[in-house]
Image: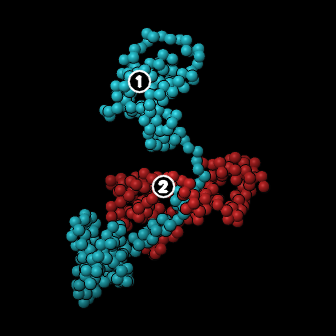
Chain colours: A cyan, B red
């Protein structure tokens, strides 16, 4: 019989939400009237349960021990003989406070179950899908599997960019503005801060032709030196540049 | 009348959040409020009558189109996101906050008999519970209450729609003041 009990508890281990929950379970299992709890029996079973948790080396929350001492306290009070002459105030049943607590907890446990059974948003009922803001689009893109990009795709991205810029600007070339080393340093510095960047982001607002070329050359150099890696999520997708070694 | 009904129907569809009556009043200032209310009731009745895939629901004090609960399994297949699930510990904590708000942590713990710090954190993160203020007692504990989001997620028109707690009436004589917080 004892054996059977302990396995019974073992299955239930995880699902008790606390000492009150455990007590309610014991009351239900023994088919006890909650207003007339046989404290000795319940205390014994309660302590048996605590012993089992300990034997399984599971953490025993302090609340369980507090309840154990409460139960023992009630039990001892009930063992005391009733005073022959009733005192001025009628002595309250030592179980009253515990019963009140159990009933209250039981009511909320029921309420919680009812709440969980309601048609829940995004589980049972749905609203019209909201327009996806840009932010979520971006975050899902990074979750996609990354494909390694070849030099040719980098070149293609470069071509696309060049074809987009204003023809007038194509004529304004100033080779003195910056050296390749500067751009390389700039790229590495930004990658260290941002973790990953697209070609577009690398250029920012400054889309002069010389800068595009220099940035592109710098990238080619960096890829060759294996200082950066280029990935894209799909063919013709946005190419992302990652630092080769996480700093 | 037919026209007003159509306008309201369109407004509800286009609204991001549950559409409150006040907003409809503001958009249709020429129309009597009673007439608008009547049109809304008619719309709700029409959707109920139709028994289609869409329900016109009163949630969180407003009106919103929602899919019929029975069709949830189908709609789920369309969605890639998993619904946020709550543990029974979190649900119990939420129920206590919902029925007893405004409430402080120690009061919740005396009902549940265990620490609820973590559960409250989860509920705050999911925006189902919010900090209402601080109680003017030593230590100035934080007072918690439910949010509008709570009503939306649990498909409730307002807090008075929560089913009454069993056996709690006899335990607590003081009148419940749940309605007072329905629009906060």
Residue B130 shows up from this direction: no
The spot of residue A166 in percent (x, y) is: 58, 19
Q: Chain of mark 2?
A: B
For label 1, the SS is helix
Q: Which residue is mark 2?
A: B82
Q: CA distance from mark 2 to mark 1?
A: 42 Å
Q: Please tell me in which quadrant of the rendered image residue A219 appears.
A: top left
Identity of the residue drawn at 22% across and 80% down = A76
Q: Is the residue marked by circle 2 packed among few (<14), some (14-19), or many (20+) residues within 10 Å? A: few
Identity of the residue drawn at 39% across and 17% down = A180
Q: Chain of mark 1?
A: A
Q: Is residue B47 left or right of residue A209?
A: right
The spot of residue B79 in percent (x, y) is: 54, 53
Q: Which residue is mark 1?
A: A220
* Label drawn at residue A68: none
The spot of residue B170 in percent (x, y) is: 45, 75
């Amino acid at each position: 019989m004892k054996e059977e009990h302990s396995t019974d508890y073992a299955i239930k281990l995880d699902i008790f939400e606390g000492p009150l929950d455990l007590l309610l379970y014991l009351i239900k299992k023994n088919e006890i009237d909650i207003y007339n709890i046989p404290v000795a029996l319940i205390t014994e079973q309660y302590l048996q349960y605590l012993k089992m948790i300990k034997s399984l080396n599971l953490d025993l929350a302090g609340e369980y021990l507090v309840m154990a001492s409460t139960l023992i306290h009630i039990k001892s009070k009930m063992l005391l003989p009733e005073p022959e002459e009733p005192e001025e105030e009628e002595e309250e049943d030592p179980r009253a406070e515990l019963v009140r607590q159990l009933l209250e907890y039981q009511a909320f446990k029921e309420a919680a179950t009812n709440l969980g059974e309601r048609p829940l948003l995004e589980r049972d009922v749905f609203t019209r899908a909201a327009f996806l803001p840009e932010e979520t689009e971006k975050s899902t893109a990074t979750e996609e599997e990354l494909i390694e990009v070849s030099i040719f795709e980098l070149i293609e991205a470069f071509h696309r960019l060049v074809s987009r810029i204003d023809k007038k600007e194509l004529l304004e070339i100033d080779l003195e503005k910056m050296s390749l080393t500067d751009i390389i340093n700039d790229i590495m510095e930004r990658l260290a801060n941002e973790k990953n960047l697209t070609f577009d982001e690398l250029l920012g607002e400054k889309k002069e032709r010389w800068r595009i070329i220099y940035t592109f050359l710098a990238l080619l150099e960096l890829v060759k030196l294996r200082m950066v890696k280029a990935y894209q999520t799909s063919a013709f997708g946005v190419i992302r540049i990652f630092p080769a070694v996480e700093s | 009348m037919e026209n007003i009904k159509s306008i309201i129907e369109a407004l509800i569809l286009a609204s991001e959040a549950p559409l409150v009556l006040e907003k409809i009043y503001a958009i249709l200032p020429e129309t009597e409020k009673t007439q608008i209310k009547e049109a809304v009731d008619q719309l709700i009745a029409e959707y109920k009558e139709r028994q289609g895939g869409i329900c016109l629901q009163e949630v969180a004090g407003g009106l919103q189109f929602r899919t019929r609960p029975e069709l949830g399994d189908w709609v789920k297949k369309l969605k890639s996101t998993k619904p946020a699930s709550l543990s029974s510990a979190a649900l119990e904590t939420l129920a206590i906050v919902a029925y007893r708000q405004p409430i402080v942590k120690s009061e919740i713990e005396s009902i549940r008999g265990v620490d609820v710090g973590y559960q409250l954190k989860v509920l705050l993160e999911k925006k189902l519970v919010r900090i209402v203020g601080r109680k003017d007692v030593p230590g100035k504990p934080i007072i918690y209450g439910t949010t509008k989001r709570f009503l939306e997620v649990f498909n409730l028109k307002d807090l008075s729609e929560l089913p009454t707690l069993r056996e709690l009436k006899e335990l607590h004589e003081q009148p419940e003041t749940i309605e007072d917080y329905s629009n906060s």
